Amino acid sequence: MKLLVTGGAGYIGSVVTAQLLEAGHQVVVLDDLSTGHADAVPEGAELVRGTLREKAAQVLQGAGFDAVLHFAAKSLVGESVEKPGLYWDRNLGESLALLDAMREAGVDRIVFSSTAATYGEPERTPILETDPTRPTNPYGATKLAIDAALTEFARLHGIGGVSLRYFNVAGAYGRFGERHAVETHLIPNVLAVAAGARESVSVFGEDYPTPDGTCIRDYIHVVDLGRAHLLALEACTPGRHRIYNLGNGDGFSVREVIEVCREVTGHPIPTTVGPRRPGDPAVLVASSERIRTELGWKPEHDLRAMVGDAWTFLKSRA
Ligand code: UDP
């Protein structure tokens, strides 16, 4: 297939682009490089630099694309709370420009990067796709709005859409991994201590109603996540918008993650305890039953593999 990958210079977009190329697809990456890196775009993919508003229509029109995989987004929860307008503009606004460009060019399949942040504070665990969506920050709210737009474009314009709601993505795929200028995620922050780039890692809150008092999350390897995109691409059905959670279905506390990082790196990894981070739910664990049943997806990598691959990646860049 001929595919447009938005955000293909970012962490997840670059991994999925590599997997798509390996599967024999032709890929054009559209990325404004605001947070991505030109040298993260896998060899064999063409890079077009620009925003979706600037370039999506121009790239798609008359070029024979079969589908779009849409990763480009602002994705920092804290920043979204400080600058909600920026998030609505860049996430929803740019996505609407992309959907319009697809409609005009007659490209009718899209796989979209949605998030567990669309659910907000869950009422029960594990979270099902049918559970209430009450995002607690603008990041989650903008992603939920894009899911709503996809439903309408499916119903009214015949687009076939699949939204994948990611839980906590970790790990790396060869030379493709996390290279965020501002790193907020737990595993890269813990590994930065093992690599000597930080003295200690701060545990954000130890007074949650969980067995060790720290937050529990569902970690999924970026390679397993990427495979789900290839399955979702095949499953896009004109006129239908489907939503799938993507997680391993197992919860690990912040303390447990740090312990796995100690085992993998052999470093003592000192910790400090800080206050809770605003907006962090105590437990976020996915039920991925729907995608397992409907698309036959199944995770193959555990937390140790995620930490091991992220560690190898980090060391390779040191
Ligand atoms: N966390 C932490 N210290 C850090 C980064 C994250 O204690 O330096 C905690 C955070 O509060 C959350 C969990 O680790 O409970 C996972 O956070 P992350 O930012 O990786 O992903 P999120 O769950 O916010 O998507």
Image: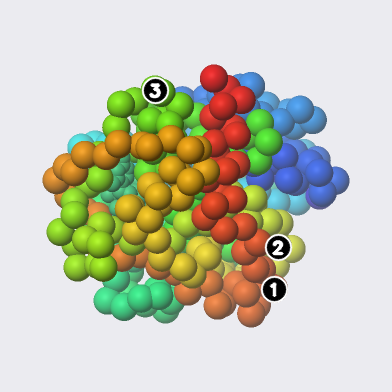
Residue that numbered label 2 is attached to: 231
Q: Which dot marks residue 116?
A: none
Q: In the image, residue 118 lies at what x, y percent?
A: 36, 61
Q: Which dot marks residue 197?
A: 3
Ligand 1 lies under 8 Å from the Cβ of mark 3:
no
- In front: mark 3 or mark 1? 3
Mark closer to the chain start, 3 or 1: 3
Residue that numbered label 1 is attached to: 296
Few, some or many residues within 10 Å of mark 1 (<14, 14–19, 20+): few
Give the residue displayed 27% in from the left and 76% down from the top: 123
- In front: mark 1 or mark 2? 1
Tag 1 near tag 2, CB within 8 Å: yes
Going by the numbered disc 2, the residue's amino acid type is Leu
Going by the numbered disc 3, the residue's amino acid type is Ala
Going by the numbered disc 1, the residue's amino acid type is Gly
Quadrant of the image containing the C terminus: top right
Q: CA distance from mark 2 to mark 3?
A: 38 Å
Tag 3 near tag 1, CB within 8 Å: no
Q: As displayed, is residue 72 above or below residue 99? A: above
Q: In the image, residue 26 lies at what x, y percent?
A: 80, 40
Q: CA distance from mark 3 to mark 1?
A: 40 Å
Q: As displayed, is residue 261 above or below residue 299? A: above
Report the front residue among 87 and 93: 87
